[in-house]
Image (cartoon, grey):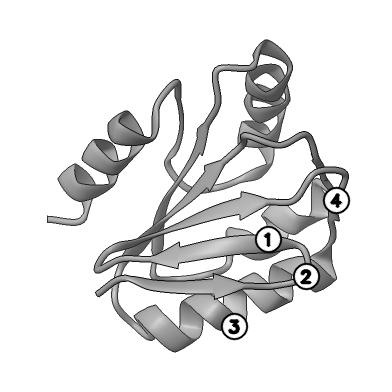
């Protein structure tokens, strides 16, 4: 399965066991955005385990409250950030403290996808 969704704040690619989200430049991801993303995940993954991959090629921010809600998604079994940008990686290290799920940081999308496939087997 490979579906593409374009929202006003991001682009989403849906695969069998993971979704890749690329947020637009300048967005501040709020709980409202998170609800929309959760609804997309619920539509495609229902009760099936999945990984959320955020491909941080653009500069944006995330309200830490988002991670409290994201932690409550029962079939979300992992979360990862993909970026080569030092600032994005530093922010991800802090965000990691707010999420009660496996959380990894990778330089490349290939590494993230390999990780996602390895833990959804």
The crowd level at tag 1 (other Cα within 10 Å; few <14, some 14-19, many 20+) is some
Residue in the picture at 85% in, 51% down = 27
The answer to whether 50 appears left or right of 120 in the picture is right
Q: Which mark is residue 39?
A: 3
User: x, y (%) of residue 77?
Assistant: 37, 56
| 3 and 1 marks in contact (CB < 8 Å) | no
Instruction: Find disc 2 in the rendering and name its residue.
Output: 8
Name the image quarter holding residue 91. top right
The crowd level at tag 2 (other Cα within 10 Å; few <14, some 14-19, many 20+) is few
Instruction: Find disc 1 in the rendering and name its residue.
Output: 10
Q: State how far apart marks 4 and 2 are (Cα).
A: 10 Å
The residue furthest left is 121
Q: State how far apart marks 3 and 1 are (Cα).
A: 14 Å
Of mark 1 and mark 4, the one earlier in the sequence is: 1
Of mark 4 and mark 2, the one earlier in the sequence is: 2
Of mark 3 and mark 2, the one earlier in the sequence is: 2
């Amino acid at each position: 399965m490979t579906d593409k969704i374009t929202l006003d704040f991001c682009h989403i690619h849906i695969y069998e066991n993971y979704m890749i989200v690329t947020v637009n430049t300048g967005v501040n991801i709020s709980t409202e955005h998170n609800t929309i993303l959760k609804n997309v995940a619920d539509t495609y993954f229902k009760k099936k385990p999945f990984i959320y991959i955020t491909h941080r090629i653009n500069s944006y921010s995330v309200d830490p409250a988002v991670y409290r809600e994201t932690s409550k998604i029962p079939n979300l079994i992992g979360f990862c950030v993909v970026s080569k940008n030092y600032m994005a990686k530093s922010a991800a290290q802090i965000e990691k403290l707010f999420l009660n799920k496996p959380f990894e940081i990778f330089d490349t999308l290939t590494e993230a996808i390999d990780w996602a496939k390895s833990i959804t087997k």
